[in-house]
Image (cartoon, rainbow, N blue to C red):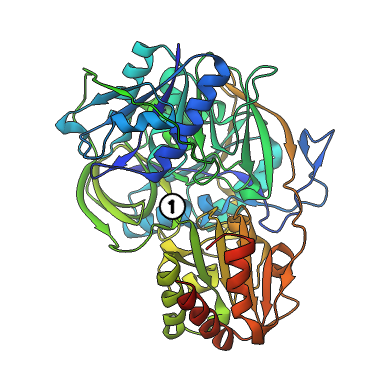
Amino acid sequence: MKILVCVSKTPDTTAKIAFSDNNTKFAQDGVQWIINPYDEWYALVRALELKEKDSSITLHLVTVGGADAEPIIRKALALGGDEAIRVNADNHDSFYIASQIAEVAKQGAYDLVFTGKETIDYNGSSIGGLVAELLDLPYVALATKFDLNGTTATITREIEGGEEINEVQLPLVVSCQKGMAEARIPNMRGIMAARTKPLKVVEPVAVDNLTSVVGFELPPAKSGVKLIPADQAEELVRLLHDEAKAI
Amino acid sequence: MSVLIYIDQADGHIKKASYEVLSYGAKIAEQLGTTAEGVVLGKVQDDLAGLGKYGVKKIHQVTNDNLAHLDGQVYAKVIAQVAEKTGAKVIVFSNNVDGKAIAPRLSAKLKAGLVTGAMALPDTSNGFSVKKTVFSGKAFANVAINSDVKIIALNPNAFQVTEGAGTAEVVAFDAAVDAPKVKVTATNKVTGEVPLSEAEVVVSGGRGMKGPENWGMLEELAHLLGAALACSRPVADAHWRPHHEHVGQTGLAIAPNLYIAVGISGAIQHLAGVNRSKVIVVINKDPEAPFFKAADYGIVGDAFEVLPKIIDAVKKLK
């Protein structure tokens, strides 16, 4: 049984969002980089839990990025996993990235591919679906629970106003979100072990980008808060009704 | 050539998000000088022809027992057949749970560039680019789609529904439908509750509520306003409230007309999930809470004293 977890490098959740080069590039000065939280907290940790229950599981990580993504993938390996693959390509669209992951997944004949539900920078939420279609595999998006019994996966996925329980045979692609697992912190032994775990670098396959970012913009600033004294809280309701027309 | 709109339904009822994508897709068709057509999978109780008032001229309906539940693999293949038959150049989805399961698959199948999280109509003055949210709502990107066929997934609550006059012609579409590989064994819906992603008004609580036993006031306010309940990450992590109520950068991103935050300080990660709300109200006893900077209306005060007054005032209003 082989699991592939897709991890992506993203700016820290508290990073200042600013743009350079006439608003065409994300300003990276002083930005801390992290593993995309959905990839780390939910996809990777749930895969680790599965491996801890069944030691015959092989767990590989894949990232599509330049050499600057390596500290992130080492950090992911410190949490666990047997080896990592970096597809040496940077600055591409979701279709390109998914095509690279699909190629790695095909070569490695994985039974299960986990992704985070989206990255916190591009918010595409499309890698899992793209990879699944390229591999012609079933895909369950926005999973909040995942259990395995032999080759049958039982998955809870989010639907509007509730949840749905799915049963699917492996092989399968799943995008993971809150509920799947609890975040972990790597321990010293993991960090030491990660240094010597294999990190393979492979060259990308030739694929066209279907989209390209033309430019970025920041949302307009709020005009300022209107404060209402606490002892006149009912005034808020009047303002929401008469002025904002929101209730 | 046409603009094809995926009409999302659940249990035979058209979802609210579908009215938004219908209005949005019809506007794109107008922009491109073509017609808007819809596609709906499965049986529907609601009046499909009536959806013409949102600007759609023709609706292709595929009914087949294999479409009883969502399996993105099966659905994408069917929608691809409709897209090819109608010569669709632009295909529109809602960026909701089902849209996220289907649109990427269709994109890979048709080699059609996809932009998810769209916020506005495409700019067709020079090529075709779409404004989308990035950095969890902290910024926007304009993304050009360079392929012949283009797919857009529109953020819920991002586009105003427009109604006119008109009836859509509903036609049965004969498609090859595979047997699903995803088996649905149970559906658990919280009945009587407004789904958070579709809610016009959201009442949200944070650590300042001190404990799950104090949620009664928020529930009462939400009930009076027909609102959905939400919470901050610490509240969900402490299991005071279920995970699906967590809004913020690592939870759900929402964009209601009105967001009322009680006892939430407004960490940058929380703001990222809610800052597209049209009107933000913050109630917090700490005047230095960063959330006030992002708010339209604020009350510096103890939630346990302020909320009963607000609840009374809302009752009087009704």
Residue at figure coordinates x 79%, y 46% from the top left: A18
Q: Position of residue A17 (x, y in %)?
A: 75, 49
Residue A130 visible, this orientation? no
Disc 1 target residue = B198
Q: Is residue B295 above or below residue A23?
A: below
* Residue at x 59% of width, y 79% of height: A234
Horizontal side of A167 relative to A239 (left or right) equals left
Q: Position of residue B285 (x, y in %)?
A: 67, 83
Across and down, in percent, residue B141 comes to 68, 36
* Residue at the image position 83 percent from the left and 47 percent from the top: A29
Location of the N terminus of chain A (image quadrant): top left
Chain of the residue on which disc 1 is drawn: B
Q: Amino acid at mark 1?
A: Glu
| Position of B56 relative to A51 (above/below) | above
Q: Secondary structure at mark 1?
A: helix
- Residue at screen point 40% across, 68% down: B242
Number of marks in the rendered image: 1
Around disc 1, counting alpha carbons within 10 Å, would you say few (fewer than 14), some (14 to 19), or many (20 or more)? many
Q: Position of residue A28 (x, y in %)?
A: 79, 45
Indicate left or right for B41 with B2 as reference: left
Depth order, front residue of A23/A87? A23
| Nearest to the observer: residue B300 or residue A168 | B300
The answer to whether A224 is drawn above or below residue B11 in the figure is below
Q: Quadrant of residue B67?
A: top left
User: Which of B316/B28 is in front?
Assistant: B316
